[in-house]
């Protein structure tokens, strides 16, 4: 059983990081890609688990946003980005328990559908999460954290941008442990990119 779990973990790590190794050969000057500058930001996420329990959550998030092709070796649309997130927060249901997570999200903008300067985007990704609590049947405190969402980015005259998004947030251990009760949440994100 332990060997099976180690094999799954190795496969996941290979998938998440193996395909993202940069190519180190120096391309010819005419072939060099030009990437948008890295963007940094922070956000506040708040919401609630809706299955199995009502668990209020509030998270502070740090963000790094890069062109998708800076990280992954394959071609991607110009409006595709990769966002790395570091989250820390608390539950708001009287337990006052901690939550820590690190995520990698693919994010795609749709400028052709911009409304009043607000550019819509969709995002999806996965991460690892530690919760200082467990619901009945959850099994582990360390879990995987797949997410999906959509939102808007509104540029500001200062050069920064306000962001807002709605996310569906899941955590489970992917059957690495016999008890694998997942927790599903809906979160609102409000952030600033500079």
Image: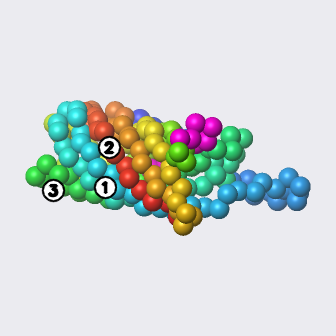
Label 2 sits on residue: 187
User: Residue drawn 36% across and 37% down?
Assistant: 168
Q: Mark 3 vs mark 2: give the one in front.
A: 2
Residue 29 visible? The answer is yes
Label 1 sits on residue: 59
Nearer to the camera, 163 or 130: 163
* Residues at circles 2 and 1 in contact by the CB criterion of under 8 Å: yes
**Mark 2: secondary structure:** strand
- Where does the image place residue 81, in percent across and percent down from the top left? 59, 48
Vertical placement of 172 versus 131: above or below?
above
- Where does the image place residue 52, in percent across and percent down from the top left? 19, 33
Quarter of the N terminus within the rendering: top left
**Mark 1: secondary structure:** strand
Q: Is residue 112 part of the magenta span, yes or no? A: yes
Q: Is residue 11 part of the magenta span, yes or no? A: no
| Disc marking residue 96 | 3
User: Residue drawn 22% across and 32% down?
Assistant: 51
Give the residues in magenta: 103-115
User: Residue drawn 43% across and 38% down?
Assistant: 149
Mark 1 and mark 3 lie on one chain; the one further toward the N terminus is 1
């Amino acid at each position: 059983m332990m060997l099976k779990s180690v094999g799954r973990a190795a496969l996941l790590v290979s998938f998440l990081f193996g395909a993202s190794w940069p190519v180190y050969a120096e391309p010819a000057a005419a072939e060099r890609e030009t990437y948008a500058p890295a963007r940094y930001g922070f956000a506040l996420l708040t919401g609630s688990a809706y299955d199995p329990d009502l668990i209020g959550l509030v998270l502070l998030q740090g963000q790094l946003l890069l062109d998708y092709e800076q990280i992954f070796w394959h071609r991607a649309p110009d409006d595709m980005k990769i966002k790395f997130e570091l989250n820390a927060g608390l539950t708001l249901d009287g337990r006052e328990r901690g939550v820590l997570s690190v995520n990698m999200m693919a994010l795609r903008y749709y400028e052709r559908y911009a409304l009043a300067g607000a550019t819509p985007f969709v995002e999806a990704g996965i991460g690892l999460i530690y919760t200082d609590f467990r619901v009945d049947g959850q099994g582990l405190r360390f879990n995987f954290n797949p997410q999906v969402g959509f939102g808007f980015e509104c540029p500001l005259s200062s050069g920064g941008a306000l962001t807002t998004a709605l996310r569906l947030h899941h955590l489970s251990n992917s059957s690495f442990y016999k008890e694998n009760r997942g927790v599903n949440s809906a979160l609102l994100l409000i952030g600033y990119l500079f």
